Structures are given as C-alpha cells and as structure tokens.
Image (cartoon, rainbow, N blue to C red):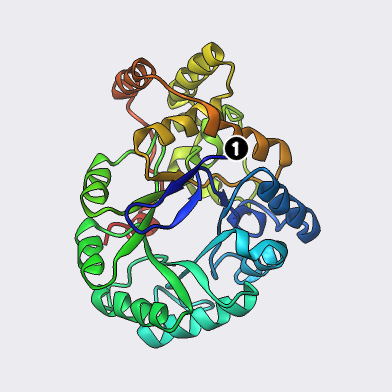
Amino acid sequence: MKTRKLGKSGLEVSAIGLGCMGMSFSYGPPKDVGEMTKLIRAAVDQGVTFFDTAEVYGPYTNEELVGGALAPVRDKVVIATKFGFNIGGEGPNSRPDHIRQVADASLKRLRTDVIDLFYQHRVDPAVPIEDVAGAVKDLIAAGKVRHFGLSEAGLDTVRRAHAVQPVAALQNEYSLWTQRPAILAVLGELGIGLVAYSPLGKGFLTGAMSAGTTFAADDFRKTLPRFTPEAMAANQALVDLLARLGKAKGATVAQIALAWLLALRPWIVPIPGTTRLDRLTENNGAAAIELSAADLAEIDATVAKIEVQGARYPAHLEARTGL
C-alpha cells in the first residue's frame, strides 16, 4: 500500500484508510466484535495504517472496537476520532471543558496514550472556532493529541481555526456524486489534507445497488433523499460510467471510484467503510490503479452532463454542515 501525507502537516497515512463506523453504527445492527476485530487486523496486513472512528459511533462501542483491534500494532497505525456532540443529549457541544473530557475518555476506550488526529465532528455555532482550536492546541501541548482536524466545516471556519492551530485534515463527504471544488482550492492553498468519507456514495458507487434496493428500518440510508428508488434510477448513469472504465482496466466499479479520488490531489485520502473482507481487499486494490489524463477528462465530461438526483442528507442534517 502506498502512503500519502495529509497536506503540510507531516501526518503520513496509507493512501486508502478504513472508516470503521458501519461496524457498530448506522448500517443495521452492530456487527460481531470478534469478526470486526479480524477485519481490522486484516486491513493492517494489507497495508492500511489509517483508521477512523468517533465517540458518537455506537456511541462509544466503535472506539472500543478499534482500540482493542489495533492495540497489538498501535505503534504502526494512525487512529482518528472525533468530538463535538452531547451524547445522550441534544445538539453539538464543543465547549473546551467538554473537548478535554472527551479526549480523556476516548484515550481510555482506544487503549492509547495519544490520539493521532482529533476532529471536531460538526461545528458548534455556540462556541467560537478559535476557542475550539485553542482547546485542541492545549491537548497537543499536553501530549494527548498529535493533530487537529475538522469535519464538514465551512471554509471561513477552516481558515479561522487554521490561524490558531494548524488543521491537518478536513474530513468531508467527497465522491463522484458529491463534489465541491471550492473546498479543494482552499485546502490546497492552506496545505490541509482532505479525508474523504463516503467515497463510494454510501455503497451506491459500488454498482451493487439499483432502484429496487431496499433498506432495513435501522439502516440510515432509508432516510436519505438520494436513496429513494427514483433517485437511484436517475443516478445509475454514474455507475454505468464507472463500470465502462472499469471494464477497460480490469477493475471494479468501486475501484474506479476510489482511483478517481486518489487522482484528484496527492493529499486526498478516502476512507471507505466495509464489514466484509472481500470488499476490503477490493477497495484497497484501488491504490494500484492509475487513471490517465484522458480517463479523468472522460469522467469529468460525463459527470458534467449528469444531474445528480436527491439531496445527500435530509434538511435537518445538512443544516449542521458548512458552518
């Protein structure tokens, strides 16, 4: 597995990371801890060094899973987690005292003495971002955190935070059907890496779904406008494009979707999630696929003609982003 540096932070990680949320949260019932531990360790064996979790996933149980699975190889991997919610309460909470409490609790669950990358999960409108960045700066000085990150923050917020404590990475949804070039411009200017969550469009850009796909009541995709039968039928053109390129290169739909992200910028790191070993191996294989300038131009030209149907989030969740 090749490695990449997240912007100018010096934080070096595998070109493809592993998003661990779905092992414990959001995509149906939590999976078996023993099986998921084996999967995480298989990722390490395949060269993955970058693992993403958060206190809210479970809550808490995903951090415990990741910490236990990675404890034997802790010195060889980078663990990212997140703060910023009132667990069991309402809304965001990024008060400095709360950030410190979350850091200490996450360290215990992760079985480590330092968090490699500590993200604000969502911006808290009630707390100036300068105070948030200052709190994480203090945690870095105390040796409890190595790097500061933001997730789904507005670009002005990113600039203000970066002025107080350099931001190593912005974690945002980014994929063929969720593109925001203005973000790439600002991150490139500031020397901040992009960690792309849902790089496979929450599974749609693997080619495994169709307009007839249904979701269990506890699968959060059931609530997303982009996953209605009508939207999936309309967006099938994106999958058809990926399949056509994949056939020419002997690659899968998912591999082309990930290879496209890797080709966009050298400081973009996608973190696809999975609970299956075959999908893990498939996703990691994307790191070896090279897309030519002609391939990228074909993708851009085709995508420009496709109007993606359906919002990525319901309005109340989208309102928490871009602040």
* Above or below for 37 versus 180: below
Q: Position of residue 72 (x, y in %)?
A: 72, 64
* Above or below for 194 versus 2: below
Residue at 57% over, 27% down: 207
Q: Quadrant of the C terminus?
A: bottom left
Q: Residue furthest top?
A: 248
Residue at 58% over, 47% down: 273
* Above or below for 100 versus 165: below
Q: Residue furthest bottom?
A: 97
Q: Is residue 71 left or right of residue 80?
A: right
Q: Residue furthest right?
A: 34
Q: Quadrant of the N terminus?
A: top right
Q: Position of residue 68 (x, y in %)?
A: 71, 67
Quarter where residue 57 is shown: bottom right
* Residue type, mark 1 in image: Asn
* Above or below for 259 versus 271: above
Q: Position of residue 66 (x, y in %)?
A: 65, 63
Residue at 66% over, 52% down: 28
Q: Is residue 160 left or right of residue 237?
A: left
Disc 1 crowd rating (10 Å Cα; few below 14, some 14-19, many 20+) is many
Q: Is residue 103 visible?
A: yes
Q: In this view of the protein, which residue sits in the foreground, 50 or 18?
A: 50
Q: Is residue 82 left or right of residue 64?
A: left
Quarter where residue 51 is shown: bottom right
Q: Position of residue 122 (x, y in %)?
A: 38, 65
Q: Which residue is mark 1?
A: 284
Q: Secondary structure at mark 1?
A: helix
Q: In this view of the protein, which residue sits in the foreground, 58 or 223?
A: 58
Q: Is residue 196 visible?
A: no
